[in-house]
Image (tube, helix red, strand yellow):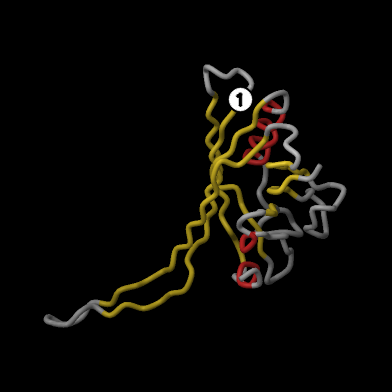
């Protein structure tokens, strides 16, 4: 069973960013048919444009300049329940604690597949004009009532050449 939504981290010495690389670590969500109980509750994208403002003389409106896209962040809210909850938590935390880049992938070593947001599907590219995701933040929420359930909120930040995102639109 393959997850409809996937996040993977390429190995430390990987030369390609493909999810099929043997050293890739994968966390799968929303399997069909439903299996492990790992699923996304919501995914939202935040695209921020850098708009700078120049002071104008009295009576004129300040001129603004389009500085282009400043940042792209994905906010993922998910649930891991059942037996894989502990393993899933540990994997996400390990990814957060360890390096988010490698020598071959200096802009990011994380890739994504989203069934409902394919414009943010990304396989890391590791060259001078490369790109990839960085894990910026993870919040773990342990429900006191449901012992085998862990919720999380993860923020992925896009890093590198905008061509990786533009290619999907």
- When asked about the image quadrant of residue 96, the answer is top right
Vertical side of 56 occupied by 162: above or below: above
Where disc 1 sits, the SS reads strand
Residue 72 lies, in percent from the top left, at 52, 60
Quick one: which residue is furthest to the left in this view? 59
Q: Residue at x 47, y 74 (%)?
A: 68
**Is 25 or 36 nearer to us in this picture?**
36
58 relative to 6, above or below: below
Q: Nearer the viewer, residue 136 or 76?
A: 76
Residue most toward the right? 22
Q: Is residue 51 above or below residue 94?
A: below
**Badge 1 density bin: few <14, some 14–19, many ≥20, Cα 10 Å:** many
Q: Which residue occupies 73% across, 53% down?
A: 102
Give the quadrant of the C terminus: bottom right
Identify residue for label 1. Answer: 149
Tell me what residue is drawn at x 67 percent, y 46 percent: 99
Q: Quadrant of the N terminus?
A: top right
Direction from residue 161 to residue 56 in the image, left or right: left
- Residue 149 lies left or right of residue 57; in this view the side is right
Residue 29: image quadrant is top right
Q: Nearer the viewer, residue 127 or 37?
A: 37
């Amino acid at each position: 069973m393959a997850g409809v939504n996937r996040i993977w981290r390429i190995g430390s010495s990987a030369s390609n960013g493909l999810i099929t690389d043997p050293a890739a670590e994968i966390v799968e969500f929303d399997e069909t048919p439903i299996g492990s109980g790992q699923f996304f509750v919501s995914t939202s994208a935040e695209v921020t444009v850098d708009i700078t403002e120049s002071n104008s003389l009295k009576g004129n409106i300040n001129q603004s300049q389009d500085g282009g896209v400043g940042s792209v962040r994905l906010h993922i809210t998910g649930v891991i329940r059942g037996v894989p909850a502990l393993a899933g938590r540990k994997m996400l935390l390990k990814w957060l604690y360890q390096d988010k880049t490698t020598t071959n992938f200096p802009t990011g070593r994380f890739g994504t597949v989203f069934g409902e947001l394919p414009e943010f599907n990304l396989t890391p590219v590791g060259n001078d004009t490369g790109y990839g995701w960085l894990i910026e933040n993870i919040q773990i929420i342990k429900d006191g009532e449901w012992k085998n359930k862990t919720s999380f909120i993860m923020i992925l930040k896009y890093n590198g050449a905008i061509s990786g995102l533009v290619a999907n639109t």
